[in-house]
Image (cartoon, rainbow, N blue to C red):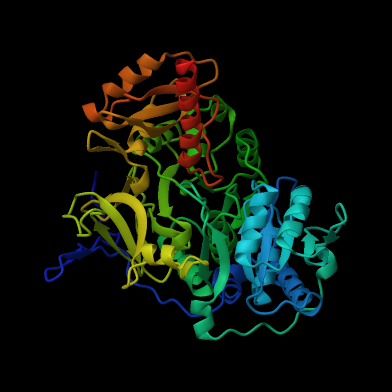
Amino acid sequence: MTAPPDEVPCFRKPRLYPETNIMIYTPALPEIEIPVVDIPTLIFNSEHYQKVLSQPLMTDTLGEYLTFEDLIQDSGSLAGGVRKTLGLKKWDVVGVYALNNIDFPYVVYGLLRAGCTISPINAAYTHEEVAFQLKDSGAIALIVDPLLVPRAKVAAQLAGIPASHVFVMGDAEVDGVQPLSGLMDEPMDPVEFTQEELKTKPAYLTYSSGTTGRSKGVVTSHYNVVSNVLQMYQTMKLATGPGESCTGALPFTHMYGLVAMLHTAPYMGVHVITIPKFDFATMLKVISKVKPTTLYLVPPIMIGLAKHPAVAMADLSSVKYIISGAAPLSAELSQALTQRLPHIKVMQGYGLTETSPVAALSMPETAVHGSAGMLVPNSEARLVDPETGLDVPKGERGELWLRGPHIMLRYLNLPETTAEALTADGYFRTGDIATIDEHGNIFIVDRLKELVKYAGLQVPPAELEAKLLTHSKIADAAVIGIPDDISGELPLAYVVLQPGAEITEKEIQDYIAERVADHKQLRGGVIFTDAVPKAPSGKILRRVLREKDAARRAALAAGNAA
C-alpha cells in the first residue's frame, strides 16, 4: 500500500479525546459549504447543468432521450398537474414503482417540485410487498411502470389507494390505468420550503433492503440529499463532469441508483445511459455501442466483468472508471478486474440507505484495492467495540459509526429501532465491522449480525466469499453459519460454478484451508446451487439463504429419522 501523492489532500490523523477515550476520524478533503435549499433548486442551478441544457440527460437502450432542458420543463408541468388536478399538498406521499426509464427523472423532480414526499418501490417486489410499503409510508397515490401495472393495481387496492390516484408512466392507458401524460398541466409557482422543513421533513421515504429482517422506511430530507450530492461531487469532480457519460444499470428505486444517477450525475452535467432491467449481455452491448466513460456497478456485476468470457469480445475502450458500491468489493476481485482491464481505474464507495447513501468514496488518485474509500467531506467516523461500547485502538476492527449532514432523520414509525441506530450525539451505528488504515482508507470487513462464531472466534463471511471467488471454477458464492452443538456455528458455503465447471466439495474446502486460518475453514461444508439470493443492490440476502438452509437441514433430519 502506498501513501497518497503530495498533490492530493492528506488524511488527517484521528483525534483522541483522553477524557472519554473517543477517537474521531475525519476526511482528507476540507469541509464544504452546504446550502439549505431544496433538491431541484440545487440541481437545476448547477453551473454544470446549465452548460448542457440542450444535451441528453438520459438515454435509453432504444435511443430515446430526455434533455437537461426537458427535465426542467416536464417536471414543472407534472408539478402543476399534481397540485391542480390531483390536489396533492406538501409532504403528501407518492409511491413510484418502476423500472429504470427516461420518464423516471421527470416523475421524481415533478413530485419534489410539487412539494410531495416520494417513496421509491423496488421493481422486483410482489404485490404484497408493494402494498406493505404503500401502507407503511402512508402513500395516497402511485405512479407505475407500464410493465408493472398488474401487480400495482392489486397492491393499490390492498393499500386503499383509489384508481383515480394510480397513474402509468407514458402516454397510453394500460389495463384501465390512466396515463401520467394526462396529469401534465401548466407549471405553477415553485413550492416554497422553510429551512426547518428542508432539514426535518422527508423528501424521500426509501426502504432498506431487509437483508436481515423486515425492510424499514428511511426518512431522508432535502438537506440530506443536497449534502450527499455535494459530498460526492467534491470527491469525484476530478474524475467526471460535463461531456462525460455513465451507465444507469443501478435501480433508480434503490438509494444508490437514485442519488448517483438522478441527482449527482445531473448536477455534474453527466449523461446517463439507462438500462431498464439489468442483463449482463445487454450491458456489454450498450457499453460497446454508446461508449460511456464511467460505470456505476455492484459487486455481482464486477464478478462478471472479471470472469465472464463475453467480456473479451466487448469494446470497453471508452471506460475510464468503474465505481462499485452497495456491497463490499474484495481486494482480490478488484485486482482481478484491474488485471483483466488495466486501462480502467477501479474505485469503490461505501454507504447505506441511512447515509443518503454515500459515506465513503475512493478518489481516483488514491484508490486502494479492497478499500471502500475515504470519508466524504463534512463527516466524522468512530470505530467502536460492539461488546464494550469503547472506541478500538488504531488499526483494530470495530463497528463503524458515522456522523454528518447526510445521515437520515429516523426510521419511519419505528422509534425504538431509531433509538438503537442513532446515538444521542448524532452518530449512526452502521452495523458494519471496519478498519481504517493510516491513510484514512476504510475497509469493510463484514456485517456485525452476519459474523459466524466458531468456537468463540469470529469468522467473517465476506472474507471467505472473497477467497472463494478467486477460484477459476467458481462464479459466485455466499457463506453463512449453521448451528453446531460443539463449536456454536460452522461456516457453510453456497457455491455457484462457472458454466461447464466440475469440482468437488472437498476440493473447495482444501482450497480455502490453504488460504485461511484454521478456525475459518469451511467445516459446515459446501452446497452447490444455481444462484445466490441477492437484493437488486447486490447485497447477499443471507436471511433468505439461512431460511433455505434451515429447511434443507430439517428435511435431512426428517429423512434420517425415518
Which quadrant holds the N terminus?
top left
Horizontal and vertical percent position of residue 119: 62, 63
Residue 226 vertical placement versus 392 (above, below) = below
Is 16 on the left or on the right of 512, as rendered? left
Find residue 222 and report its horizontal and vertical position in percent. Answer: 53, 73
Q: Is residue 147 left or right of residue 528?
A: right
Q: Nearer the viewer, residue 418 or 86?
A: 418
- Left or right: residue 336 versus residue 487 is right
Quick check: can you spot residue 116?
yes
Which residue appears at 81% of the width and 58% of the height? Answer: 170
Residue at 54% in and 15% down: 500
**Tag count in the figure?**
0
Corner quadrant of residue 482: top left
The vertical placement of 484 against 436, above or below, is above
Q: Quadrant of residue 456?
A: top left
Q: Nearer the viewer, residue 490 or 371?
A: 490
Q: Residue furthest left?
A: 18
Q: Nearer the viewer, residue 461 or 131?
A: 131
518 or 53, nearer to the observer = 518
Q: Which residue shows up at 38% across the image and 62% down it?
A: 421
* Residue located at (43% from left, 35% from top): 337
**Residue 458, percent across and down?**
26, 39
